[in-house]
Image (tube, rainbow, N blue to C red):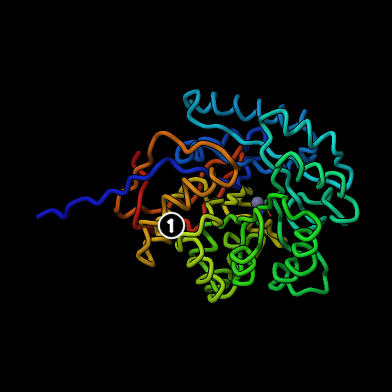
Amino acid sequence: MQAATENLSIIRPDDWHLHLRDGEVLASVVGHTAQQFARAIIMPNLRPPVVTTALALAYRERIMAALDKAGVEPGRFTPLMTLYLTDNTSADEVVRASESGMVHGIKLYPAGATTNSDAGVTDLLGRCAKALAAMQRVGMPLLVHGEVTDPAIDLFDREAVFIERVMLPLRNAYPELKVVFEHLTTQDGVQYVQQAEGPVAATITAHHLLYNRNALFQGGVRPHWYCLPVLKREKHRLALLEAATGGSGRFFLGTDSAPHSKGLKENACGCAGCYTALHAMELYASAFDSVGKLDQLEAFASLNGPAFYGLPVNQDRLVLQRTDYVIPQELPLADSTVVPLAAGESLGWKVIA
Ligand code: NCD
Ligand code: ZN
């Protein structure tokens, strides 16, 4: 007798934190995200970074062209653009961004915190006061990479120290500013977001829900598990899993899928970033399933994000099937390849529609 198939149908999800890159890499990856998600917040850390509305709109056109070229039907996927905050972002630029209707957030990269962040902010409260005041006024969310860059602070403590040194003073100075703590990785971060007053939310990646830092070193150094913020201890993973599946509207899906070529990852100084766009919903479903909370997946993936950003919920649906799915070893990436997270391993879910 054949076992009955088990399907899980949810409102089509959105990805609230995604790196699409540009040029041939963009062309290689955009179809994966469009396959699963209706919308995504597109990170602005290109080289050079997307620092103006004009640059964001031009980048949006390149994404639309890439979608068309990849055969994605018109209207199926909408990129939600962001700007890259610098010490020089003006209040006028914030207003232009807001009035464009296409820019949905401004991203704070502390200078030097991660991939392509050299142009980032050196002193948020000191240098960005005018931009932050304008963002608070027009309701433009600040998306934060929440890690200090102080080399004296242990890599694994940088999120907790960021809360003390940056988040608390920021929230005191701009209590109505909408803030998304991107790719939250610690129990400290979860507690902060749960207890903060005012409009504060957080995205959580699939890899931080599924893996702790042991994954980086299992059997040797494994560069495809290296991302920033880096994977943390098991107690932090458990806190994230509880937050994501616990029914709070403050936590929502953001893959932080960040493609780097195989050669740049498997390298003496390998790049940070995990590629999860191909199998994002399979990874999230596996994480939720691991704690018997599949019933919470729709809120996390499809409802909480639009509510925070003030956008409508998607109309169509995504269907996952409980079945064995083996993650491919490599995928084309421009003239190279990218190794998806957990390549060659199997998951218990597959997106079928
Ligand atoms: C991201 C990238 O490669 O652009 N890398 C990563 O490890 N997450 C940058 C970022 O989001 O920190
Ligand atoms: Zn990112």
* Foreground residue among 341 and 3: 3
Is 106 on the left or on the right of 40, as rendered?
Answer: right
Total count of labels: 1
Rendered position, 276 above or below 336: below
Q: Quadrant of the C terminus?
A: top left
Rendered position, 185 above or below 180: below
Q: Quadrant of the N terminus?
A: bottom left
Residue occupying the point 31% across, 55% down = 324
Question: Is residue 312 among what the camera can see?
Answer: yes
Residue occupying the point 85% across, 34% down = 92
> Identity of the amino acid at label 1?
Gly
Q: Residues within 10 Å of mark 1 (few under 14, many from 20)?
A: some
- Badge 1 marks a residue whose secondary structure is loop
| Residue 23 screen position, x and y as percent | 67, 32
Question: Is residue 220 among what the camera can see?
Answer: no
Rendered position, 265 above or below 68: below
| Residue 205 screen position, x and y as percent | 55, 57
* Foreground residue among 308 and 180: 308
Residue at disc 1, CB closer than 8 Å to ligand 1? no
Q: Which residue is mark 1?
A: 344
Is 50 on the left or on the right of 292, as rendered?
Answer: right
Task: Work out which residue is located at the far left of the displayed protein and give it.
Answer: 1
| Residue 59 screen position, x and y as percent | 69, 31
Residue occupying the point 87% across, 49% down = 129
* Foreground residue among 271 and 246: 246
Is 199 on the left or on the right of 96, as rendered?
Answer: left
Q: Quadrant of residue 169?
A: bottom right
Rendered position, 273 above or below 232: above
| Residue 54 screen position, x and y as percent | 77, 28
